[in-house]
Amino acid sequence: MYSTFSKVDERAAGGSSIFVKDNVIHSTVQLTTDLQAVAIRLSLDKTITLCSIYIPPNSIIDKAKLKNLTDQLPSPFILMGDFNAHNPLWGSKTHNAKGKIIEDFVSQEGLCIFNDGSNTYLHPGNGSYSSIDITICDPSLLLDYSWRVHDDLCGSDHFPIVLEHFFNSAQQRVPRWKLDKADWSLFENLCRTELQSKMFETVQDPILTFNTVLTSIADRTIPKTSANPKHPSKPWFDDACDQAIGDRKKSERRFNQQPTTENLSNFRIFRAKARRTCRQARRTSWKKFVSGITSRTPMTKVWNMVNKIKGKNSKATVKHLKDGNNLLTSEKDIANKLGETFAKSSSCNNYREDFKKVKKTKRKN
């Protein structure tokens, strides 16, 4: 996690943060600015700079400060955050001073805005919607990503902004049977009905027939995990969490359809309940696991459970290769560099050079 905060009466306030997975190659970008901004370099399909910024509602900003910030961001970069700026250019119904300044800055610097006009913020006091979260980028990145607003507030006042790479090849996992949610009564009845001994007497491959019928029965009675889940599975996420989050989403949709004071109040209640339910489920799951730990429990198992509770995916991803000051980010470049290095290390010329160095060292001694 990378964060920056302002100080109000010696107390941290506002601020901006970036959370990044441990298995993603990244490095911090040192910024010299009085803006509440933090930036990192990410090695994804290619190396980009991501900067998160927060501009408080009552603060004053000018183009010089924004330019000073973006000049420190290695290109190409994405600048996103809560600007508290209103402008029809990104979906607001009105203008304010910040909105005009940002519009002029984006135009003069030749930058692009991802926003499509969708609302990004729900005011907790009066229940009004607005667009104050902006995603700005280099023109070279505009066509690489899709931009959308998540349909669920996820317990916040701001809707999450989702950037997805168009050519991102997500790794699929093998679906597994959810045996704890199987309908075993129906499974047993179907086996008695469809797995008759006489059906195997006339087929050429009885084992194949048995496997085909049994798999068909299992598909109808036992649910499976997703082959390409949106989120890693969490051991603490139970039916109570699912119900609480479902109630929160339902109350949010009801408020969207009928924005009354009563519906807003109900949404706040269900949002608080969902937070409390998930927090309690996480604690209970951890206590249950810890109670079963003994002196013989492998540390690998303990850390795997810690990562699962946090929702981290332990599956390794393709790593990038550092070649001097250059960072190779494509599989082709990595393969070519490794092949070049192996060829050089195993060549006869390389052995001759090493042999000559050894002989010179012996003569000196």
Image (spheres, rainbow, N blue to C red):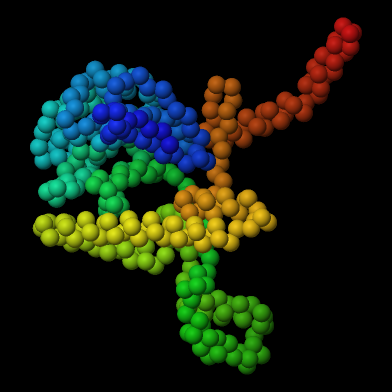
In the figure, is residue 228 to the left or right of 304? left
In the image, residue 124 above or below residue 330: below
Q: Quadrant of residue 355?
A: top right
Picture coordinates of residue 34 (x, y %)? 29, 21
Is residue 57 in view? yes
Judging depth in this view, the residue of 119 and 57 nearest the camera is 57
- Furthest residue toward front: 9
Q: Quadrant of the N terminus?
A: top left
Q: Left or right: where does residue 327 sit relative to residue 132?
A: right
Specify whether 58 is left or right of 113.
left
> How many numbered discs sit on the rendered protein?
0
- Residue 216: x %, y % from top left: 52, 77
Q: Residue at x 48, y 64 (%)?
A: 225
Which residue is at a point 47% across and 37% down the rendered structure image?
Answer: 44
Which of the 4 image quarters holds residue 272? bottom left
Residue 157, percent from left and from top: 24, 47
Residue 296, quarter of the rendered image: bottom right
Q: Position of residue 323 (x, y in %)?
A: 59, 25
| 86 displayed left or right of 317 | left
**Image quarter hosting the C terminus:** top right
Can residue 113 be seen in the rendering of this structure?
Answer: no
Residue occupying the point 18% across, 33% down: 57
Q: Which residue is the extreme one toward the bottom?
A: 198
Residue at screen point 40% across, 42% down? 165
Work out whether 242 lies above or below 338: below
